[in-house]
Image (cartoon, rainbow, N blue to C red):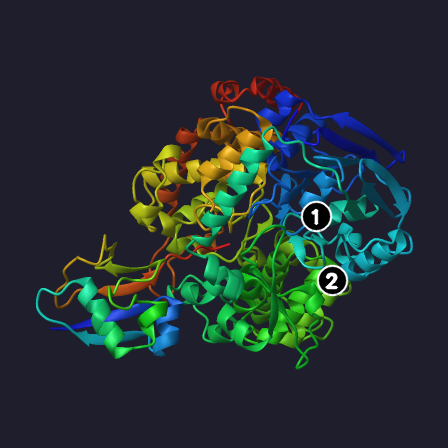
Amino acid sequence: MKLTVGFYCGLARRLSKETEAEVEVHEGATLRDVCAALAKKFPAFLGQLIVPGTHDLVEPHFFNVNGSRAANLDVTVQEGDRILLMAITAGG
Amino acid sequence: MFGYMGKILRVNLTENRITEERLEENIARAFLGGRGLGAKILFDELAPGIDPLSPENKLVVAAGVVTGIPFAGNCRYVIMGKSPLTNIWGETNASGFFGPELRFAGFDAIVFEGKAERPVYLWVHNGEAQLRDASHLWGKVTGETEELIKRELQDDRIRIASIGPGGENLVRYACVLSDFHHANGRTGMGAVMGAKNLKAIAVRGTLKIPLADRDRIAELCKQASKEVWEGAYKDLLHKYGSDGDLDDLHATGRLPTKNFQKCTFEQYENITGETMAETILVRRDPCFACPIACNQVVAAQEPYVVDPAYGGPEYESAAALGSTCMNGDLVAVAKANELCNKYSLDTISTGVTIAFAMECYEKGLLTKADTDGIELTWGNHQAIIQLVEKIAKREGIGDLLAEGVKRAAEKIGRGAEAFAIHIKGQEVPMHEPRGKKGVGLAYATSNRGACHLQAEHDDFFEDPSWLFPEIGLDKTIDRLDMGRDKARMVKILGDFKALYDSLSVCMYASWPEGGVRVQTIKDIVAAATGWDVTLAELMTVGERAFNLCRAFNVREGVSRKDDVLPARLMEPLPEGLYQGQAIPKEQFEQMLDYYYEFRGWDKETGIPTEEKLEELGLGYVTAKLKTSRQSK
């Protein structure tokens, strides 16, 4: 299935030069699978934004799915979900 | 008493008299230092209703109990007095080296009162203090003032907090600078110094802070060093400074732009921390004992010569002098920042005031006839630079803008008030409350007027890993939530920040933004003082300080009617991820009800109740508030 991930953090936009990206993942995919697909599409994400191997998100980044913060990367997603890649912004 | 130098210096400028007072242990334990100690001194000693620029105002310079103990984030100090910008509680913090040096020079705090007959500066050295003539320094910018004092006293290691022409000319948002670029930025304490003919405070010392358990402190400092390296923001802060956040705030549509009319900025990439690092950055400077080194130092030749001695813009300065004025020229931002540091002007208030003037110009309320011929169009960075100069010198249009947006709008009239983005008279900083609504409540209830540092921002507390049940932060809350739990969160965080400002520790080194754990800081306080302190006791100190500052403001006439947001910040956001998000008045008022309930304040008036003050050991404050109300 195809999913669109919105980039609502500066690092993802800077590394990809995009504000969103479409990725293809299998039915029943988790957010970790989305991370793997993003890393494949944008190798520059590896290291700075996505941990090589585990495909964890580098702190303080997280996903927001359909308006709520995703508890972890094991959350499954489906076609039509609104997926945002974000960062905790400190302020100050 | 351990943990303190145990002495407060009192400097009567009118009588040219300096005395020492003992810091009593019961006061130290109840207020710790910094904000808490200043609140105690100023509430007790200032009469309500005084003119902040008169000799009746006092200025307290205070370090905290951990200031100068060598762990990351221990370097801050606070300057406090009645604010000439807001006419209420004034308070401003800075990092760097001045705070620790004040303690090594023998004092936990200095209280200035009266007004010197002619310009002076205070020289404090190893327990001795003297007032020295500063006539030859008057009119000099901050950096030159520092250099001349160091030359005069023949010691390069002296730390100096000084004002430039902005403070001398009583710009209502003049700040105080130390080491050329560490700014005690907000609420106009530089103008209070100027009104007192106090050009600078110079400190130097080699005295040791008495510590109850020096071995334990050494262990805890090692522990803190380990923790600071584990902080989630350490690398970001080191590489880009706080301006590393600017691109995230643009991406989420929370970057104040065009005087808060917009929340994204097309030219944002020009002014990010990343761009700064790739273009004009020359080095990163640390503060005392801190390995993060988040101070970004910049230099440039074209289109402006920017002097690296004055540091570089952090996030607030980059957004206030950049996106808020639609200025996408990084070197111009850096130049305006340099001038603010030279002249001692708060970058936030300066930027927001210039943006206000630009909107007045756009809407025809100001014309070239008012602006001394300057074309005050959005993004015109030559105009921004010219205005910074004029504000500092109170020349032409600068004289009006030196008053801040509230007073300037009242003078301009014809609806200009709608473009004056302030709370309680202080210009709103660079955080969009419609995309993090706890910030809106913290803005409205801040004791020093609009302030982004009264409560850590909402983003953290959506994530369970950032919760802190030991202080009551025990459930995640969405950034857009405006309910009861959000009000409780803002109350707890308000007490927590008041504690940090009393200790005085840096938010970038300590939880949640920095790695040093609160438990470690508590243990350092215990090992330094020998007191068996608990986290609950420390949180009560924060709550006590917060309430005493509120009581100070109540005495000046503040009540629920003043806990408001500018109308513009309640309207639906026009664009971005949170397009359409507003802060509806009814919901805001409901949130305020909840907040007062958690605070133990009267819901109708917003005044701390007798029971709450009694509970905090501030029973005597009730009587003073009653006397004050009766005399009105």
Q: Residue at x 40, y 46 (%)?
A: B438
- Chain of residue at mark 1: B
Give residue B342's mark: 2
Circles 1 and 2 in contact, beta carbons < 8 Å: no
Q: Quadrant of the C terminus of chain B?
A: top right
Mark 1: few, some, or many residues within 10 Å (few <14, many ≥20)? many
Q: Position of residue B425 (x, y in %)?
A: 60, 48
Closer to the chain start, of discs 1 and 2, is 1
Give residue B98's mark: 1
Q: Quadrant of the N terminus of chain B?
A: top right
- Chain of residue at mark 2: B
Mark 2: few, some, or many residues within 10 Å (few <14, many ≥20)? many
Q: Position of residue B120 (x, y in %)?
A: 87, 46
The kind of residue on which mark 2 rests is: Lys
- Quadrant of res B253: bottom left
The answer to whether residue B579 shows anywhere in this view is no
Of labels 1 and 2, the one closer to you? 1
The tally of labels here is: 2
Q: Secondary structure at mark 1?
A: helix
- Most foreground residue, A68 or B180: B180
The kind of residue on which mark 1 rests is: Phe
Relative to B249, residue B403 above or below: above
The answer to whether residue B168 shows anywhere in this view is yes
Q: Secondary structure at mark 2?
A: helix
